[in-house]
Structure formats: structure tokens, C-alpha cells
Amino acid sequence: MTSNTDNPPVYQEKPSSAKETTDLITTTSRLATTSRLAGTVRTCSVAERQIDYFSIVRVSDSSYHLSLTVDPTPLYRIELIPEPTKVGNIQIFSMSDPTLPAVAAAYVSNDLKSKTLPIGTVCTASPTEPDALWRPISRVMGYFSTPMDECSSQIPVITVPGRAADYHHFTWRTADSGRVFRLFWEGPPPLVPLELYDFVIHKADNIFATVTTQPDGGETIVAMRAGGGIDFELSVILEAFLMFRLMEKKAKSK
């Protein structure tokens, strides 16, 4: 009697189906062309310090256009309203659909000299709705309760791509006789632990936006951190206009 193990069958690989072959080629190709866990998906965080540059140009006595510095096509229209309305004195409209209501707005305080009242309030989501959220931007007080050329606010900002925005404390500081405004993140910036943080040494790391105006009222350049989210970006624009009004009021009072 002959054992079955004396003449074992010749080994043959199982024929691959067309789909299995295609999947294998696709997977191999992807692994060969990417060297990241995220593959070809690109993310951007404010911690990376990538900068987006915008241009603000006056087109009439009360209207401005916002565009990228690399493309003059207007993205948003900014309207200054002399008298306060239910949607604020400063309103931002999308240029993609002129029939839409304001996408963001701000109120300017009637008393910019007040030491206690905010210089204005900001809304970056559906300002025309009755339950819209309005956030204050307030003067920073110095010694002996003296108002400084600084303002602070809580701004929603995305720090982890794909996650919701969180509110963080920011401060606006002026330079060059009020023609430059810088927005500083207060405290250690994202991914920087407190024990390794020194504001004096890492001061530049805390700058999240810089707004540079021209003395003759020409083009305004806005440089801001990319990845912070639309609420952060709209807040920068609206609060910059509030700072403009504050500096104009101060100049007229001299």
C-alpha cells in the first residue's frame, strides 16, 4: 500500500482574480509614491506658520474689496455703514453670490473713549439671524487704568486640522504710528509646552496676523496664519477694521 505522502501534489499558487491584481497594483503604487501616513491628503495647521496674504483695496467712500495678493479677483466686499443697523456698521459680503446677506459683521462702539465699554462686537456666522453670537473686542488697560493702543478678544481658531475651533485669547498691538497692527496669540502657541515657552525669545512665534496700512489710504496688506478656519480669518478682517476706527478716532482727538 502506497502512502499519500509519498507523491504529494505539485504546489500551485491560487490564480488571482482581476480585481485582486488591480488592488495589489494600486496599493503598491500608492506606497511607492507616498512617504506619509496621511498619503496624498494635505493638512495645514496654524502651528506650521504658513501665511496667507490678502489685499484690501478701497473702491468707494464706503466699500472695499478683499482679494489674494496673487490674484486680484475680489473674494469679499466690505461695506462701512455710517449709521448702525441690525447687522452692524461693518459688513462682509461674499462676491460669489451678491444676493446673499452679510456673512460676517461688526458693530462699532458709539463711545470709543470709554475705559469700560468694548470698542466693538464681532459676529462671524450668520449676523442677520436673531440668535447670532456677537463677541466683544476691548481696550487693554495699562497702569492707573490708562487705555493703551492695544485691544484683546476671544477668537475662535482651529489648532488641529479637522477638529472644531476653540476660543483663544488674542491681543492686537500697534506699531509704526498706528499703521501696522499685529495680532498676538497669548500664551504658548500650539504644540509648545509651557515649560519650554519664553515670550521674550519666541515673541515672533506668537504673531498670528499682521495688517499693514498705507499712509495715503492705499492698499492694505493682511498676512495671517493659514489653517485657522474661516471664523478666525473673518475675525482678523473685522477686528482690523475696528482697530482702524480706533486709531482714526485717536488721531482726530489730538
Image: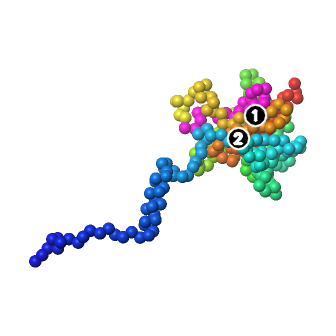
**Residues under numbered marks 2 and 1 in contact, where contact means CB atoms less than 8 Å apart:** no
Question: Disc count in the image?
Answer: 2
Residue 140 tag number: none
The quadrant of the image that shows the N terminus is bottom left
- Assess disc 2: are there few (<14), some (14-19) or many (≥20) residues with their C-alpha within 10 Å of its C-alpha: some
Residue 199, percent from left and from top: 60, 27
Which residues make up the magenta segment? Answer: 173-191
Residue 129 within the segment the image draws in magenta: no
The answer to which image quadrant residue 14 occupies is: bottom left
Q: Nearer the viewer, residue 233 or 24?
A: 24
Residue 32, percent from left and from top: 46, 53
Residue 16, percent from left and from top: 39, 69
Gap in Å between the C-alphas at discs 2 and 1?
11 Å
Helix, strand or loop at label 1? It is: strand
Residue 225 makes an appearance in the image: no
Q: Nearer the viewer, residue 55 or 154?
A: 55
Q: Residue at x 85, y 37 (%)?
A: 110
Identify residue for label 2.
53
Kind of residue at badge 2:
Tyr
Query: In the visual, does 199 lie left or right of 140?
Result: left
Helix, strand or loop at label 2? It is: strand
Residue 212 tag number: 1
- Looking at the image, residue 70 lies above or below residue 130: above
The quadrant of the image that shows the C terminus is top right
Q: Nearer the viewer, residue 35 or 237?
A: 35
Kind of residue at badge 1:
Thr
Residue furthest to the top in view is 144
